[in-house]
Amino acid sequence: MKKRWSERLGFLMLYLAGVLVLFFLGVILFDIFIKGVGVLSWKFLTQPPRMGMTEGGIFPAIMGTFMVSIITVIFAVPLGMFAAIYLNEYARPGKITRLIRLAIRNLSGVPSIVYGLFGVVLFVQMFRFGTSVLSAGLTLGLLTLPWTITACEEALKTVPKSYREGALALGATKWHAIRTNVLPYAIPGMMTGVILGLSRAAGETAPILFTGAAFFLPNLPKSLFDQFMALPYHLYILSTQHHAIEKVRPIAYGTALVLLGLILLLNLSAIWVRYRYRQKMRG
Amino acid sequence: MRILNVRVWMLVIGVAIGGFALIGPEAQGQNMIQVKGSDSEVNLVQRLAEVFMQKNPAVKIGVTGGGSGTGIAALINKQTDIANSSREIQPKEEEAAKSAGVQPFRVVIATDAISIITHPSNRVSKLTLEQIGKIFKGEITNWKEVGSKDAKISLYGRQSNSGTFVFLRDSVLKGDYSPNMKAMNGNAQIAEAVKRDAEGIGYVAVGYVVNEKEEVMEGIKIVDVAKEAKSTAYTPAKMENVMSLKYPITRPLNHYTNGKPAGGVLDFLRFEISGEGQKIVRKEGFFPVQKDWMEFNRKQGL
Amino acid sequence: MEEPYEPSVTIEEAPVEKAWLHKRIDTKDKTIAFRKLRARRLNEILIEKFFFINGLLAILILLSIFSLLFVKGFPAIKELGWKSFFGSSVWIPNSYSTPQYGILSLITSTLMVTIGALVIAVPLGVACAAFISQVASPRIREILKPTVEILAGIPSVVVGFLGIILVNPLIAKLFGISNGLNALNGSILLAIMSLPTIISLSEDALRAVPNSYKEASLALGGNDWQTLIRVLIPSALSGIIASIMLGMGRAIGETMTVLMATGNAPALTFNFLNAIQTMTATIAIELGEVPYNTTHYYALFVIGLVLFIMTFVVNLVSDIILQKYQQVER
C-alpha cells in the first residue's frame, strides 16, 4: 500500500523529534565529557583545590556532596517508607487519604528555591542549626520526601495481595504480615526509588545555597554543624562568580563531569537493583 | 527482619532528634576563621589567607564570596568572623547590627580603583564621571551619544549584593541603575561578557583586569576617566594615578569584624596590612592601603 | 495497576482470636493468653497510629511551607500594601532613593520563559512520545527511553552551565546581537529540562489508550498517521495535557538554569532577546544578602508565596484533568 505524502511527512517529523531529543542529550554528554575528561585524574578527585581554585582537585566538594546525601537519606528514607506503608497498607479510601496524595503531588512540584527559603527559616534560624551539613541535608530531605514516598508506594504495590492474605490467614497480625511477607519483597523496589531520589538530591543547588554550601573551605566539615563544599555549588561558583573564570573553565568542566558521572552511576545502580529484583520476583 | 523492627526505628529517630536538639548549638564547628563577602576582595583575601595559613598551620581560614551585602548580613547574623566589604557599611545595616548586638569594627586592607571596561573595538577611550553615571542610569542609551558608532549600549553590572554596585551607585550615579543592566554574578563574569560583546560596557574592580605590572588583561579595554568635561582623563591601571587620587573612582577595601578583633583574627588582619601582606595585595593587581587609611588602622590599635 | 489494597481478613475476624473464646483453658493460661492478646492488639493499634502520623506528614509539610511563606511575607504586605507589589513592575529594593517592590516584571519574566519553554517542548515532547509509543522499533525504543530518563537526571546547574557556554554564543551569532543571555536562552534550557516530564507522561497516556481504538480506526480504513492524529492523541489528550501542566510547573519553579543564563535584568520587557529576571532567580540572588527580618527579607517571602501558589494551581489543574480523564475511561 502506498503511503500518502502527508503520512510520510508526518512520520518523518516524529522521527526527527526522536532524533532531536537524542541530539540534545548527546550534545550535553559529549561536550561535558570531551572538555572535562582532560582534567580528570586520580589527583583531581582526591586533592583539595589550591591557588585560589585555579589548581588542585575537588575532593572536598565530592566529600561534601557525599556527607549531605547521607543526611538526606537518613531523613527521607524511613519517613518515606513509613508514609508509603501507611498509604498502601493501612489507608482506607476517603477524604484524608485523597488529601495526603494531593499533598504529596503538590510537594513534588514546589520549586527548589522555596524549599531553600523554608530550610533557611526552619533549620538555620528556628532550630538554630546554622548554615551546616545538617540544615542542608534536612532541606534536601524534604525535597526528596515526595519522591521517596511515591517510589516506595510503587514498590509496595507490586507485591501481590496473596502474600498478605496468606500471612493473615495463618493468624498473623497485620503488622506482622507486612513485616514478614510484604516488606522483604518490596525492599529492592524501594531501594531503586531511594537511589533515584538520592541522585536528584545530589544535583540540587538551590536548596543548599543558603543552608550550608560554601565555596572555599580549608578543611572538611568536622561535624554536622559545619559548612561544606558541594559539587553543584562548586560548579555554579566556578562558572559565574570566580575571579579567573576562563582559567578555571577546565576545572568547571571537570566538576560537571564528576557530578554527571556520579548521577549516572547512581541511576545505573538503581536500574541494576530493579533488574535483579524483577528477576527474583519471577524466579 | 530485625532492621525493620518499627520500635527500633522509632527509638533511633527519637534519639536523633533529641540528640541534635540538645547538642545542637553548642557543637558548632568553631575552630575556623570565617571570611565572607565581597566578590571584589574574594580572591585577594583567599590568596592572603593561603599564605597566612602556610606560615601559621594552626590557623584555618575559610573564604567565601557572595557580595559585600552578603558579608555584612552574615556579620550581623553572627555567621561570619570577618565580613569583606568593598563599600562602607550603610546606616540601615548599622541599625540592624546594633539591634542584633553586633559592633562593626572596620579595617582597611587595600585600595581599589573601579575600572570601566569596554570591548577593544570600541572607539571611546575616555569618559567623564557624568557620562558614566548617565550611561549606567540608562539616560544615555546609544554609543553615538558619547562619540562612537550608532549602536545600543549593552550594560553589564553586578547584583545588588555587591559592594562595587553600591559604591558606584552612591559615588558616581547618585541614582538607580537602569533596569536593563544585566546583573552578573561577579567581576570575572562581567569581564568575560564584555570581551564578547562589542557594544558592552561594565564596571569591575581593578585587580580583575590589571596585573601588578600595570598591564591590562587581554580582550578588554579600560576607559580613562575624567572628573569633569574639561579635566584630564586618567587610567586606573597606573598606581600613581590611583594613590594620588587623580583617578576619581577609588575606594578602600574593608574588613568588618564584630568588635575589636583578637587572637587568630587579629593576627591575620595584622598580616594583611604588613609589608608582606601589602606586597601580595599589589601582586593581585590591587593597590596598597593609602596613607590616611593606614593611619586610621593604626589608631584603632592594629 | 492494582486497586488500593483492602485486607480481606481483619484482625477481628481472624479465627485465632475467636478461638480462645471457645477453647477451654484453665485459669492461669487464660490470664496470660488474654494479656498477650491485649498487648498485641495495643501494639497493632499503636503501630497503625504511628504509620498514620507518617502519612499525615506530607500534609503537614505542605501546610508548614505555605504558612511559613505567608507568615514571613505578611509583614511586607502589611507595611507596603498589595499595590506596591502587584501594581508595579519596578523591583529595586535597594534603591538609592526609594525602595520599590513591584514584582510584575518578575512575574512576566517567569511566564515568558515558561511559555517559551512550552512552545518548544510541547510539540517536540508529544511528537517524541508518539514516536516512542507508536512508531519506533523496539530497538530504538530501548535507546530512547533510557535517553529520556538520563536527560531527566541532568542537574539544573549543568544545564545552566552549558547555557552560558554553548547556547549563549549560538544565540548571539544567530540573531546578530551582542550577547545571548536572555529569555530565549532560558526558554531553550527550560525546554530541555521539561522535555523528559512531558515525554514520559505523554507516552504513558498514549500507551494507555486501549488497542481497540487503534484497531477500530485502522479497520475503518484510516492509515497510521490519521489514526495517530485523529484517534490516539485525542483519546490520550487529558494525560498529555496533564503532562504539559507538570512540565509547566517544573519550568516555573526552576532556579539555577534561569539564574545562570537569562542575564538577570529586572526590567519589564516582552522581547525574548532581552535579558530578564525571573522570580526564582530574584530570590536566589537576594536571599543571601538581606539581613534577616528586614522589609526586603519579608518581600522575598512574598515572591516565594506567589511561586508556591502558581505551582499549586498548576498541579491542581493537572490533577483535575487527570481525574476527569480516569472518569471518562470508566
Image: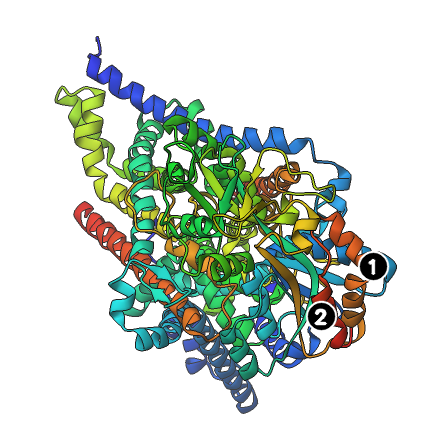
Q: From where the camera sits, is residue A280 visible? A: no
- Say if B211 sits above or below B108 in the image: above
Q: From where the camera sits, is residue C116 visible? A: yes
Instruction: Provide the residue designation for mark 2.
Output: B29
Image coords of residue B75 (percent x, y): 61, 72
Between C91 and A138, the one lying in front of the other is C91
Instruction: Provide the residue designation for mark 1.
Output: B275
Task: Tell me the chain of label 2.
Answer: B
Single out the residue that lies furthest toward the top: A2
Q: Residue at x 42, y 40 (%)?
A: B146
The crowding category of the residue bearing disc 1, from other C-alpha atoms within 10 Å (few below 14, some 14 to 19, many at least 20), is few
- Say if C253 sits above or below A246 in the image: below
Image coords of residue B28 (percent x, y): 68, 73
Single out the residue that lies furthest toward the bottom: C27
The crowding category of the residue bearing disc 2, from other C-alpha atoms within 10 Å (few below 14, some 14 to 19, many at least 20), is some
Amino acid marked by disc 1: Gly
Amino acid marked by disc 2: Gly
Image coords of residue B79 (percent x, y): 62, 71
Between C188 and C95, the one lying in front of the other is C95
- Say if C274 sits above or below C306 in the image: above
Q: CA distance from mark 1 to mark 2?
A: 32 Å
